[in-house]
């Protein structure tokens, strides 16, 4: 076990090191003026981040992934479809309500929307679309068709929001779709899909196991748009800069901060455990040895997430905000820095490693972890750079989203469906806790300097999580298109060599 943990910590160190070095290097330039206390807190937070990611990844392997697979396969094999759908809906709602990522986002817009109302609305959206995702697997429906239909519905809702003067909430709605698929939700939902698809079988079982994250990212957007459209009164946003200060989380506030994070994670894991144990007694009947192994995994997951989220909240969120304020004074540097930081931040997202491992296993090594990481890194880097450009010029998010989703949906007609499903899942996974707790504060800081604050932050800074969720859809499908094109070219060259060879060479070849 210690050997596996050491390997996980090495992987986490390699993931966190780039973004840490970038921030530290910038701190030694005249561009940024961090205090010694801020740098020390950030450095300690980076170390804790490594420990948190390592423990979380180990816990996900031991507990979260097996639990999801057992729930999916066990309920599917029992042929109790109604029970399967009911459980999936409830799990989708409850896990999302307790997802730490969503709490981070809700806390940053509490001056505009009541946090609990936002969280519950988003949870219902995830529950309904997780149910839809399971229906898709059970009845073997085409993912691309479903996604295209619901994205058309999304843009219709977006146009209604523009018509009724609530355009400033479009970025927040799209951001909610990205943050809901966080470190607790992703391992369980992805494994659930693998379990259900594996139990049903068929030649497209691998392809059907993907797509749950993609659909669960759509539900919150539609739900939150509906909430805003039907809400009465004026919704406004006010920036509270003190909430992005390191001093707000240290001293007397440190223990309450850690306790708050621990409570959120405990609730999230507790809901999964209670449901799983209930299903264990009713339908699953898993061996005691396997349950004991999962128990250790849950402990690792809990400790890892508490450490990770505390480090992000205490060290990375305030530094991200200050970094954005400083870089905003030089717009070109803001865009370039956004691209570079985006490329390395995605490496530190814990759920990304869970996805990459599953993709490599499901595709039999055809899509490697390395190629997935490169595609995600480039995609997220481009999205952050473009978002910084949007903050500077101050134009609506839909100028990016409409062509971006048009390209990504168009590519789905030219690449294998497996790549489309992986790509749309990757978009939700890439926008994890570090995005909402480091990249979003960076954008808010930049926007507070370039614009006048208030609703302009809601219009131009928010939406960056949506961009992070969108660009991997394009880059990974391009990766799939490249792989298929290369395979066809190799086959064509092989056939040409065989056709050009004489009879003696053919006999020797055989």
Image (spheres, helix red, strand yellow):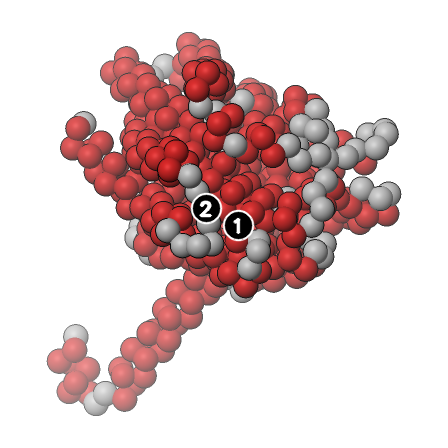
Relative horizontal placement of residue 360, taking residue 133 as reference (left or right): left
Residue drawn at x 76%, y 31% is 227
Residue drawn at x 28%, y 46% is 14
Q: Is the residue marked by circle 1 packed among few (<14), some (14-19), or many (20+) residues within 10 Å?
A: some
Q: Vertically, is 220 above or below 31?
A: above
Q: Are marks 2 and 1 in contact (CB under 8 Å)?
A: yes
Relative horizontal placement of residue 121, taking residue 57 as reference (left or right): right
Relative horizontal placement of residue 153, taking residue 370 as reference (left or right): right
Determine whether the residue tagged by mark 2 lies in a helix, strand or loop: loop
Q: Which label sits in the foreground, 2 or 1?
A: 2
Q: Nearer the viewer, residue 208 or 357?
A: 357
User: Can see residue 196?
Assistant: no
Q: Position of residue 244 (x, y in %)?
A: 54, 33
**Spatial separation of the CA atoms under disc 2 and disc 1:** 8 Å
Image quarter where the N terminus lies is top left
Residue drawn at x 43%, y 42% is 34
Which residue matches tag 1? 326
Q: Position of residue 399 (x, y in %)?
A: 70, 59
Determine whether the residue tagged by mark 1 lies in a helix, strand or loop: helix
Q: Position of residue 232 (x, y in %)?
A: 85, 29
Which residue matches tag 2? 33
Relative horizontal placement of residue 187, taking residue 334 as reference (left or right): left
């Amino acid at each position: 076990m210690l050997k596996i943990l050491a390997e996980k910590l090495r992987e986490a160190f390699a993931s966190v090191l780039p973004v840490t070095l970038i921030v530290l290097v910038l701190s030694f330039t005249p561009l940024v003026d961090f205090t010694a206390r801020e740098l020390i807190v950030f450095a300690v937070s980076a170390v804790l981040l490594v420990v948190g990611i390592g423990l979380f990844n180990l816990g996900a392997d031991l507990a979260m992934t097996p639990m999801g697979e057992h729930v999916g396969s066990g309920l599917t094999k029992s042929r109790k479809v109604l029970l399967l759908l009911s459980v999936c809906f409830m799990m989708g709602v409850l896990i999302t309500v307790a997802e730490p990522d969503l709490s981070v986002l809700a806390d940053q817009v509490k001056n505009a929307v009541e946090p609990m109302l936002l969280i519950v609305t988003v949870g219902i959206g995830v529950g309904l679309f997780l149910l839809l995702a399971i229906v898709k697997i059970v009845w073997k429906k085409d993912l691309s068709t479903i996604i295209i239909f619901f994205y058309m519905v999304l843009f219709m809702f977006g146009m209604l929001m523009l018509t009724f003067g609530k355009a400033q909430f479009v970025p927040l709605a799209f951001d909610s779709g990205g943050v809901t698929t966080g470190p607790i939700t992703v391992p369980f939902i992805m494994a659930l899909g693998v379990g259900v698809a594996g139990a049903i079988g068929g030649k497209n079982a691998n392809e059907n196991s993907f797509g749950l994250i993609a659909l669960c990212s759509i539900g919150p957007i539609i739900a939150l748009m509906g909430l805003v459209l039907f809400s009465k009164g004026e919704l406004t946003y006010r920036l509270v800069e003190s909430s992005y200060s390191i001093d707000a989380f240290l001293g007397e506030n440190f223990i309450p901060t850690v306790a708050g994070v621990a409570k959120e994670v405990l609730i999230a894991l507790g809901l999964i455990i209670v449901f799983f144990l209930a299903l264990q007694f009713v339908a699953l009947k898993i061996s005691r040895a396997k349950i004991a192994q999962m128990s250790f995994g849950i402990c690792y997951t809990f400790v890892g997430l508490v450490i990770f989220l505390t480090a992000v909240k205490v060290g990375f969120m305030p530094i991200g905000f200050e970094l954005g304020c400083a870089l905003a004074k030089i717009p070109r540097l803001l865009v370039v820095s956004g691209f570079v930081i985006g490329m390395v931040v995605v490496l530190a997202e814990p759920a990304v490693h869970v996805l990459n491992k599953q993709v490599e296993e499901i595709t039999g090594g055809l899509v490697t972890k390395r190629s997935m990481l490169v595609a995600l890194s480039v995609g997220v880097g481009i999205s952050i750079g473009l978002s910084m450009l949007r903050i500077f010029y101050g134009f609506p998010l839909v100028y990016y989203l409409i062509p971006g989703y048009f390209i990504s949906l168009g590519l789905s007609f030219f690449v294998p469906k497996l790549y489309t499903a992986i790509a749309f899942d990757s978009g939700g996974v890439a926008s994890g806790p570090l995005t909402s707790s480091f990249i979003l504060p960076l954008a808010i800081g930049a926007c507070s300097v370039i614009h006048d604050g208030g609703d302009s932050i809601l219009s131009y800074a928010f939406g960056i999580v949506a961009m992070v969720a969108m660009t991997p859809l394009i880059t990974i499908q391009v990766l799939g298109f490249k792989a298929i094109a290369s395979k066809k070219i190799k086959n064509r060259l092989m056939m040409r060599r065989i056709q050009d060879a004489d009879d003696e060479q053919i006999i020797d070849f055989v």
